[in-house]
């Protein structure tokens, strides 16, 4: 059988299926690297070289560093897996989590106050209704 033609193979999105005698082999597409021994799952390779026009300018993010610079090449390394970078608005990442927790706790407190006020209102209405019924019964019995 031809697993590739019948699409019964398990090659991933960026892997090509090559039919073989008695089976098939997954091969990563150009620009992709295998994530496992069978080449079923492939990940995109980082570009190794970029050709820019002479007038091109590059703005580096703050986590990128230039290792060497001459007229022919630039070597850039990026701390992608390193320390957390500040959020886009300049705050530390932990501060964003703290603000989120504070907002959630404030909303829960507000909800508790609203429930307390509602229950108090219902109890007061029930008490007034019972007092009114008691007054009507008293007037009927007195008459």
Image: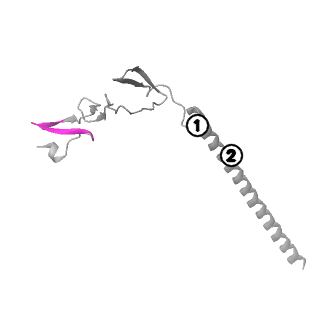
Q: Which dot, 1 or 2, sits closer to the camera?
A: 1
User: Which residue ends up furthest to the right in the rendered image?
Assistant: 142
Say what secondary structure mark 1 lies in: helix
Up/down of 119 relative to 47, above or below: below
**Closest to the observer, 76 or 54:** 54
Up/down of 69 relative to 104, above or below: above
Numbered circle sitting on residue 109: 2
Count residues near mark 1 (Cα–Cα under 10 Å), then give few for <14, some for 14-19, many for 20+: few
Q: Which residues are magenta?
A: 13-25
Count of all numbered marks drawn on residues in the image? 2
Q: Quadrant of the C terminus?
A: bottom right
**Closest to the observer, 126 or 22:** 22
Of labels 1 and 2, earlier in sequence is 1
Residue under pointer 1: 96
Please tell me whether the stretch drawn in magenta is mainly helix, strand or loop. Answer: strand
Describe residue 12's horizontal placement relative to residue 96 as left or right: left
Q: Position of residue 105 (x, y in %)?
A: 65, 42
| Residue displayed at 71% across by 50% down | 113
Q: Position of residue 111 (x, y in %)?
A: 67, 50
Q: Position of residue 137 (x, y in %)?
A: 84, 73
| CB under 8 Å between discs 1 and 2 | no
Question: How far is disc 1 from disc 2 in space, using C-alphas?
Answer: 20 Å
Q: Quadrant of residue 102?
A: top right
Describe residue 140's horizontal placement relative to residue 50 as left or right: right
| Residue displayed at 69% across by 49% down | 110
Describe residue 100's horizontal placement relative to residue 54 as left or right: right
């Amino acid at each position: 059988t031809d697993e590739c033609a019948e699409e019964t193979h398990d090659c991933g999105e960026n892997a090509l299926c090559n039919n073989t005698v008695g089976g098939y082999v997954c091969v990563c597409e150009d620009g992709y690297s295998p994530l496992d021994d069978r080449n079923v799952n492939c990940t995109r390779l980082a570009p190794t070289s970029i050709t820019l026009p002479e007038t091109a300018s590059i703005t580096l993010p703050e986590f990128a560093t230039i290792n060497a610079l001459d007229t022919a090449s630039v070597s850039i390394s990026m701390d992608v897996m390193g320390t957390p970078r500040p959020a886009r608005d300049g705050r530390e990442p932990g501060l964003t989590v703290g603000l989120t927790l504070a907002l959630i706790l404030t909303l829960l407190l507000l909800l508790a106050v609203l429930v307390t006020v509602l229950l108090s209102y219902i109890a007061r209405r029930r008490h007034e209704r019972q007092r009114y019924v008691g007054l009507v019964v008293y007037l009927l019995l007195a008459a």
